[in-house]
Image (cartoon, grey):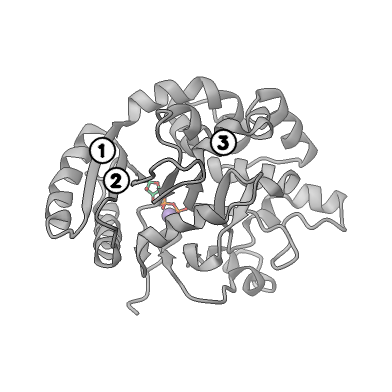
Amino acid sequence: AEDGEGVLASHFHALMMFTKVDKSRSLQDKFKVAMLSMMMHADFLDDEVLVLHFVSDPGSQKLGEKILQEFLKDATFKYEVLFHDELALTHKLFPIVEAMQKHFSAGSGAYYSDAIFFLSVAMHLIMPENITRIVQLDLDLKYKTNIRDLFLEFQHFPPEAVIGITREMQPVYRHTFWQFRKENPQTKVGEPPPNGLPGVNSGVMLLDLGAMRNSVLYNQLLQPNNVAKLAEQYRFRGHLGDQDFFSMIGMEHPQLFYPLACGWNRQLCTWWRDHGYTDVFHMYYHCEGPVYIYHGNCNTPIPND
Ligand code: UDP
Ligand code: MN
């Protein structure tokens, strides 16, 4: 396979956050569903390698290695498994994302350990230069199709796009941007699809690291003064980490994002339906077309179809 630059792109990089998994039976079950369904549908060409990256702690890594050994043993294609130490990555990440944490983190947002929730935002500065594309995936997913097809979506990025991502399927940003919406009654910010700007969900993300490195605009938006300016402009205060950052900069610069079809991250959580948004919920939750990946977010069970 050739990428845009004509360089042999035989490695398909996928990254998952994999921390405190040894402490949580629920996370272990989600991980097994994700890996089993991924491997059941995955298929690659002879010269291709699926590289699975896990950001982990020692306890979770030990458990992960054991489970993966069993789940990968019948793979019909080449693969590699790489564990990244959460603490080592946090050490690199913290100086880059420290200033944005107060806008998009729970609590005071000053915690060093919270920096890891912003890994995707600075992935282009953290990963080695030879990795030019990576897909970041949650553990609470169930794959209905070949994961290779997700990587093919990189080919559809328009010139200015740096990240491919699916819209958020609950009215969470209708809620978060309430003050801005009150002051700007005609705004599309927080409005439902197809014409509104409902924000994005970070469960499935295509990070074009090459494009992220080359985009002057994207790197300007990472600067603390520019983050503060936008947060002020939109009266934004969130707690969902990278997803909040991407949703906010997407309101101002939608051209940075390639909108992945809703079926690539079919979120199932319905929490906001029962918390003040019953009347509008369906407009956000609606997703037409085939489901490629289910996302059982907020611990929602995934259907057995
Ligand atoms: N995660 C993790 N350890 C934890 C909690 C979360 O590694 O203790 C990772 C895992 O990859 C998970 C992702 O963080 O899928 C996001 O959390 P979750 O999917 O629970 O959030 P939701 O999608 O429900 O908002
Ligand atoms: Mn999730």
Mark 2 / mark 3, whichever is N-terminal: 2
Q: Which amino acid, mark 1?
A: Leu
Residue 106: tell me if it is visible.
Answer: no
The quarter of the image holding the C terminus is bottom left
Query: Residue 125 or 178: which is nearer the viewer?
Result: 125
Above/below status of 11 relative to 42: above
Cα distance in 3D space between marks 1 and 3: 23 Å
Whether pointer 1 and pointer 3 mark residues with C-beta atoms closer than 8 Å, the reply is: no
* Residue 259 position in % (x across, y down): 61, 57
Badge 3 local density, few (<14 within 10 Å), some, or many (20+)?
A: many
Q: Kindly identify which residue carries mark 1.
A: 82
Q: Left or right: 5 with respect to 257?
A: left
Nearer the observer, 156 or 303:
156
| Residue 175 in picture, x, y percent from top left | 68, 55
Q: Position of residue 179 (x, y in %)?
A: 78, 48
* Badge 2 residue CB within 8 Å of ligand 1: no
Q: Label 3 CB, ligand 1: below 8 Å? A: no
User: Hey, what amino acid is under mark 3?
Assistant: Met
Label 2–label 1 contact, CB within 8 A: yes
Where is mark 2, residue-wise?
52
Location of residue 23 in the rendering, given as x and y in whole percent from the top left corner:
24, 44
First in residue order: circle 2 vs circle 1: 2
- Label 3 sits on a secondary structure element that is helix
